[in-house]
Image: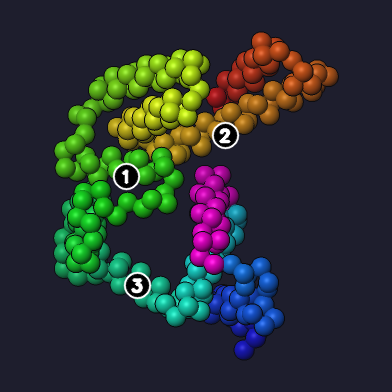
Amino acid sequence: MSESTANPKDITRLLRIMARLRDPDGGCPWDVEQDFDSIAPYTIEEAYEVADAIQRRDLADLRDELGDLLFQVVFHARMAEEEGHFDFGDVVEAVSDKMERRHPHVFSDADVADAEAQTAAWEEHKRREREAKGEDRSALAGIARGLPEWQRAIKLQKRAARVGFDWPGPGPVFDKLAEEIDEVRVEFDAVAQDDSDAVKSRLEDEIGDLLFVAANLARHAKVDPGAALRRANAKFERRFRRMEQLAASDGIDLSQLPLQAQDAYWDRAKAEEREEGTA
């Protein structure tokens, strides 16, 4: 059966398309040249585009982005099949087995009180699976290094908190944040006097500490730092674009203005948002 006559909603159609694209004889030269390493950045990018479509509540775009993300799974599975490791069916079987195994309260007779208890049970299942494989038994084991660093910071902090290594509330986190800001200031002053690699490295360390504590504060506030930063980015972009529009309507090139005059346009953009209730 050709791709054109196959059921358009059947996953086997997509698998056939992928096989054709990867065929060294008549396939797509770009697709044929790819490997796991070269495709991995696209996989990450597609996951972010899914998150962006969700944030914008654009369900039509979400459908398309989920398709693009699914294609990434099919791509990796096809490359693995070509090397004799596993195929797409094995991926489906593995995740199906895992979901049933990690949800005994659904697929067997185990009891789980609520979502929080389920999260704890899920992590316990993962821990036992790692132990069975002879993997790292640390409380921090299994946290992927490929995660965005904000997300990885939160996961590290949550894991440490499970064994009691955590501040009791946001108060000490605020104190630590102030301490880290002071330390960053010290290293900024040091770099102004000595811009050697060693001094710059200390500044990088201190800024990293500051960001790590900021992530911890977000965790205590039950705020996703990635989502918060996306909102901040969107706010900045929205206001900056409005600044450009306001300046252009006055016949002015924003880039030619001094900072004080640019700030005036920024304040106008903020004032408009407050009036519209979007600030």
Marks 3 and 2: CB-CB under 8 Å? no
SS for tag 1?
A: helix
Of 24 and 159, which appears nearest the observer? Answer: 24
Which mark lies nearer to you, 3 or 2? 3
Which callout, 3 or 2, points at the residue further toward the start of the chain?
3
Q: Name the residue under label 1.
A: 155
On the picture, is 114 further left or further right than 35? left
Asked whether residue 174 appears in the rendered view, the answer is no
Quarter of the figure that contains the N terminus: bottom right
Q: What residue is shown with label 2?
A: 234
Q: Name the residue under label 3.
A: 94
Q: Is residue 209 left or right of residue 235?
A: left
Q: Which percent across, then down, holds residue 80?
A: 47, 74
Amino acid type, callout 1 = Lys
Q: Is residue 221 located in the magenta-colored stretch of the structure?
A: no
Give the quarter of the figure containing the C terminus: top right
Lower position in the chain sequence, tag 2 or tag 1:
1
Q: How far apart are marks 3 and 2 (CA)?
A: 38 Å
